[in-house]
Image (cartoon, rainbow, N blue to C red):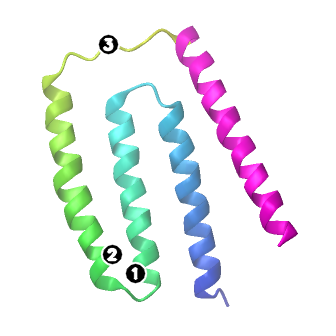
Amino acid sequence: MISNINIVNIVLIIILILNFIILIQISPIQKIFILILLYIFSSFIFIILDNIYLGITYIIIYVGAIAILFLFILMMMNIEIPSNKELINRNNLIILILITMLIIEFNLNEDN
């Protein structure tokens, strides 16, 4: 039987993966859709931990209002996609920094 702690850990791993995908994505529209998924999964954590009101509030406020407003703003903007070489260099540096921070954090937690 899967306990609530295991389900929360699985959802947290999905949230971390979605955060990395947001950093890698080129298109701002795709970033917004992944951000919507991120808010939905973060509301699942509150729902799993028996705080249903806060989870539903996350879905209504963030997904329903903020994400939709961002989509309308993005539809009105003329978006230019940067070249792949600039993007790959910037993303590799960001991902490398984040991965090293995670490794350092896990090593510090193992010592305690």
Check if residue 95 falls in the magenta segment.
Answer: yes
Q: Is residue 41 above or below residue 6?
A: above
Nearer-the-camera pick, 97 or 88 = 97
The quarter of the picture where the C terminus appears is bottom right
Q: Is 30 displayed left or right of 4 in the figure?
A: left
- Choose the circle earlier in sequence order: 3 or 1: 1
Point out which mark residue 80 bears. Answer: 3
Circle 2: residue type: Gly
**Contact flag, marks 3 and 1 (Cβ < 8 Å):** no
Point out which mark residue 22 bears. Answer: none
Q: Which residue is mark 2?
A: 55
Residue 91's spot in the image, x, y percent? 58, 26
The quarter of the picture where the N terminus appears is bottom right
Nearer-the-camera pick, 27 or 108 = 108
Residue 100's spot in the image, x, y percent? 74, 42
Q: Is residue 64 above or below residue 31?
A: below
Q: Which residues are magenta?
A: 85-112
Circle 3: residue type: Glu
**Contact flag, marks 2 and 1 (Cβ < 8 Å):** yes
Q: Residues within 10 Å of mark 1 (few under 14, many from 20)?
A: some
Q: Which residue is mark 1?
A: 47
Quadrant assignment, res 74? top left
Residue 18's spot in the image, x, y percent? 51, 49
Q: Tell me what residue is drawn at x 52 percent, y 47 percent.
A: 19
CA gap, disc 3 to disc 2? 35 Å
Q: Is 20 displayed left or right of 32 in the figure?
A: right
Q: Secondary structure at mark 3?
A: loop
- Choose the circle earlier in sequence order: 2 or 1: 1
Q: Residues within 10 Å of mark 3 (few under 14, many from 20)?
A: few
Q: Tell me what residue is drawn at x 57 percent, y 53 percent.
A: 16
